[in-house]
Amino acid sequence: MLFNRNDEIDLGDKKVIIKELLGEGGQGEVYLVGYDGGKYALKVYKNEVSTDFRYNLKNNIEKGSPSEHFLWPKRLIDFDDGRIGYLMDVRPKNFVSFVSYLTGKNTFASREIMLSWCIDLCTAFKKLHEMGYSYQDLNDGSFFLDPDTGALLICDNDNVTADKKNLGILGKMRYMAPEIVRNEMMPDVHSDRFSLGVILFMALCLGNPYEGERLKNYDIIDEKAEYELYGSNPIFVYHKTDKSNRPIRGYHSSVLRRWAYIPLYIKEAFHRTFVDGLSDRENGRTTEIEWLRLLLRYRDELVRCPHCGYEFVYGFGEKVPVDKCPNCGKPKKEVCILGLGKHRIVLDLGKRITEAHLDKFSAEYNRAAAIVIANRTTLRCGGSN
């Protein structure tokens, strides 16, 4: 440990008091500290960092956070021995890691809440890019969620830097665009969009878009295998024509089950990113705003089965109309449908009408302007209203 309990760090105008060690990684240690009358997290790097890294971190602090979804550095600290650190807010205890969701330890309270988390993720990346940043250190430990509300937090933001610039940290191959894995380009908006697609696929399907039958070719998934799977020869598990890497039955059960009930327009967006986007990184990858519109549509078309409580897509635009619950097989219930131009919202109990529904210029995709509630008088309606 670099510090002990009750150690004090004099910043001149204020003091930082060490409370306890929260965690430790390869780069540094994170402590719970007292500062300016409140509790914060302090990350201290174990070794000296480059001048460029320090300048980038200082610049990010001065520019401020892209949105409330980022656990952004707040104050830079220079130590006498040449090391640096920074203060940030403490991650609330109601947030759990994305890894715990992927492993089944934690789960979203509903599919609607999971989609709200995905929408916030796209919004966060959009705002990040609008400030001229790209996300460098992509890994499954960067993302956190509140299982009950779908709230999002993104951590490890000290490696976020200007578009097309890199400070030596790239992240995990499973999340990186193939051209970054192959070390052909520096991370930028287009590689971020590929990585965003990977995270969304993992959130919706609980699996990686390039992990299928080809896993059987390797005795161990080492760095060489990862380079081939995600860099030199990535094949989307649901490639329309190349079926050599389909999910393995009995091993990728979650992917097989969940993919079956994802709407066609979401499947097309994944295929575009993971197939077309390999050769055309600038035009072939689904953008943040495109994802936002598609995910909002997905959430708006969800309906809950009155018999078993299962959530499924009502079926607008699907090749095979959904006339019964995919889970229990009973007929789907009659619902009211709100038409907003070409957009349709299934007015199921608890469904939110957001500000983005009412104002095409609004970026508030999760802020409710109205909520569907039960009426004392039972109404029956169908079709568009």
Image: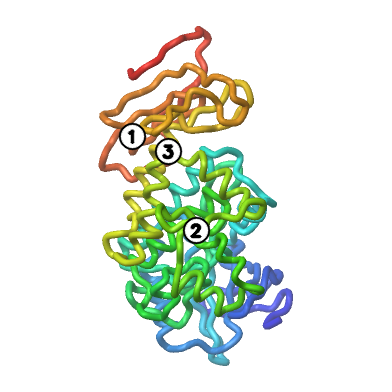
Disc 2 on helix, strand or loop?
Answer: loop
Residue where numbered disc 3 is placed: 298
Q: Position of residue 241 (x, y in %)?
A: 40, 55
The answer to whether residue 235 of the structure is visible from this angle is yes
Say which mark, if any, is on residue 215. Answer: none
Of the numbered discs 1 and 2, the one sitting upstream in the chain is 2
Q: Which mark is residue 209?
A: 2
Residue that sits furthest to the top in the current view: 377
Three-letter code for the amino acid on which mark 2 is drawn: Pro
- Name the residue rendered at 71%, 70% in the picture: 20
With respect to residue 163, does 322 lie above or below?
above
* Residue 21 located left or right of residue 339: right
The image position of residue 98, as x and y in percent, is 59, 57
Residue lying at 65% horizontally and 67% vertically, measured from the top left = 32
Residue matched to label 1: 357
Which-is-in-front pick, marks 2 and 3?
Answer: 2
Q: Residues within 10 Å of mark 1 (few under 14, many from 20)?
A: some
What separation in Å lies between label 1 and label 3 (alpha carbons)?
Answer: 13 Å
Earlier sequence position, callout 2 versus callout 3: 2
- Three-letter amino acid code at disc 1? His
